[in-house]
Amino acid sequence: ANAAPQDLTGLLDELDEAASKGGEKCSVAEIREAIGARSFGPLLTVAGLLSLTPVGLVPGAPTALAVVIILIAGQLLIGVKAFWLPGPLLRASVKSDQLRKAVRVARKPAHWIDKVLRPRLEVLAGAVGRRIVALVCVLVAVAIPPLELVPFGVFAPAIAITAFGLGLLARDGVVLIIAFLASATALSLIAMRFL
């Protein structure tokens, strides 16, 4: 596997390459191979970003992505070095042209986001911080399936997951703080709507 990308543009390059390599479809296994099996930050970023693209509008897709997020974050929580996904999930795929389109759409904001991202308050991206991030990601991902029933309900948790991924990717504690705030918003949406 390649070295983990250090910024969003690098991550998008890896995704673009994965989409161009295969045929009509790009599997989760191919995406994992492109990003690297030890890259928790990039994987969370991809899962969050996909939820924010037209892929996230496909019925059931946000819930499937939530399962991936729970599996990734759960393993980060217990301290696994290289994460594992079950065979059926690895074989799940997205249309290559849809993935390329999502990458194209993400490139403009990525350029701006990469200018903002930088290592700061790195203690939040350290061993303990990563575990706290993982726990909150699991909570947020559990909230995604019921939010599929709410128009644009998946938006807040998807932003939170993307921000957590970016914060880990760039070791940027400020972005992680923003992600915690977005998570609080997502979880309060759930509380207001369903409790």
Image (tube, rainbow, N blue to C red):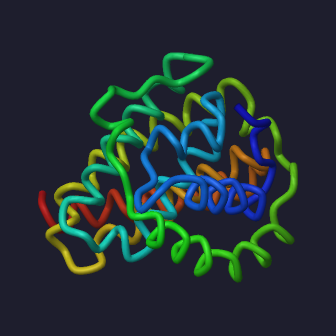
Identify which residue is drawn at 39% across, 71% down. Answer: 155
Q: Position of residue 186 (x, y in %)?
A: 37, 62
In front of the other: 130 or 184: 130
Judge whether 188 appears above or below 105 on screen: above
Q: Where is residue 153 in the image (x, y as percent from the top left)?
A: 28, 72
Q: In which quarter of the image is residue 139?
A: top left
Judge whether 57 appears above or below 96 on screen: below
Judge whether 79 appears above or below 8 on screen: above
Q: In this view, does 144 lie to the left or right of 75?
A: left
Q: In this view, does 122 lie to the left or right of 20?
A: right
Q: In which quarter of the image is residue 61?
A: bottom left
Q: Where is residue 135 in the image (x, y as percent from the top left)?
A: 45, 34
In front of the other: 116 or 65: 65
Identify which residue is drawn at 24% across, 61% down. Answer: 190
- Looking at the rendering, in which quadrant would you find the C terminus? bottom left
Identify which residue is drawn at 66% across, 57% down. Answer: 17
Count all numbered tags in the image, as a single digit. 0
Q: Is residue 99 left or right of residue 190?
A: right
Q: Is residue 173 left or right of residue 27?
A: right
Q: Where is residue 157 in the image (x, y as percent from the top left)?
A: 40, 61
Identify which residue is drawn at 83% across, 46% down. Answer: 121
- Looking at the rendering, in which quadrant would you find the N terminus? top right
